[in-house]
Image: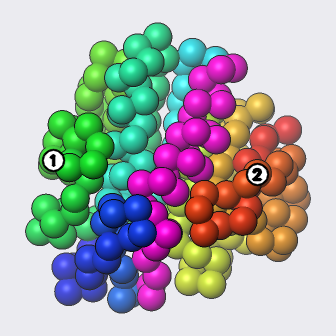
Amino acid sequence: MNSADLSLVKTKDGSDSLFSARFQDSYHSLHGAIQESQHIFVDKGLDFVAHERSTIKLLELGFGTGLNLLLTLSYAEANPSIQISYQTIEAYPVSQDMIDQLNYTSLISGQWFDEIHQLPWNQVHRILPNLSLVKHLMLFEQMDFVDEFNLIYFDAFAPSKQPMLWQEEFLSLVSRSAKTGALLVTYCSQGAFRRSLIQVGFSIEKLAGPPGKREMVRARKL
């Protein structure tokens, strides 16, 4: 994404995020970028699935600042018996000059941060012995996966900013990409979104959200 469209913002846990003028939304919760991603995607998603299976095919929608991947890499390094195939989709990559301003490497084990942003798109990369990565440069609506993933990080901009990504037509593509028993985790718990997930074949579990967010959703593909 053009750096003119983005501005740096500090969140309450001390970690940075970005505000998009294009979508009029921040990439993370202003109550804390790192604590939000850690709670929703790693603690309630990845760690939960890792107690069910040791090989995980993971889809992230979308890549953004790379924070979810960075936290997943930290988890993978601490849990070498878990094998993770990580695929992420992004239509509007953040420019390198904006990436260079983020403070994640001072707050997390950030040894991979520069690498994951500089790796070519649409290729398979082995980041750790137990984690491979593909970054897909495309619109979410262009994805064409079938019965492939065990875990989905659903991290689009808010329903008020990108409404079609939270509605049944697009969620049917998400459902098609998920294996039976797969989990989807997201920060959103709006009633219309939950009903749409049910319509496309998920059961719904509402969980306590991160600071500043009362609830989140963990959904399982039936």
Q: Where is residue 197 in the image (x, y as percent from the top left)?
A: 80, 58
Secondary structure at badge 1 equals helix
**Numbered circles on residues, count:** 2
Q: Can residue 181 be seen in this view?
A: yes
Residue matched to label 2: 207
Q: Where is residue 34 in the image (x, y as percent from the top left)?
A: 42, 54
Residue 114: numbered disc: 1
Q: Can residue 148 be seen in this view?
A: no
Residue drawn where x is 39% and y is 21% of the image: 78
Q: Which of marks 2 and 1 is nearer the N terminus?
A: 1
- Which colour style is shown? rainbow
Q: Do the CB atoms of the residues marked 2 and 1 lie less than 8 Å apart? A: no
> Is 33 drawn above or below residue 58 in the view shown?
below
Q: Where is residue 219 in the image (x, y as percent from the top left)?
A: 76, 47
What is the span of residues highlighted in magenta in the rendered image? 23-52
Q: Quadrant of the N terminus?
A: bottom left
> Is 64 drawn above or below residue 191 in the view shown?
above
Please name the amino acid that badge 2 sits on. Leu
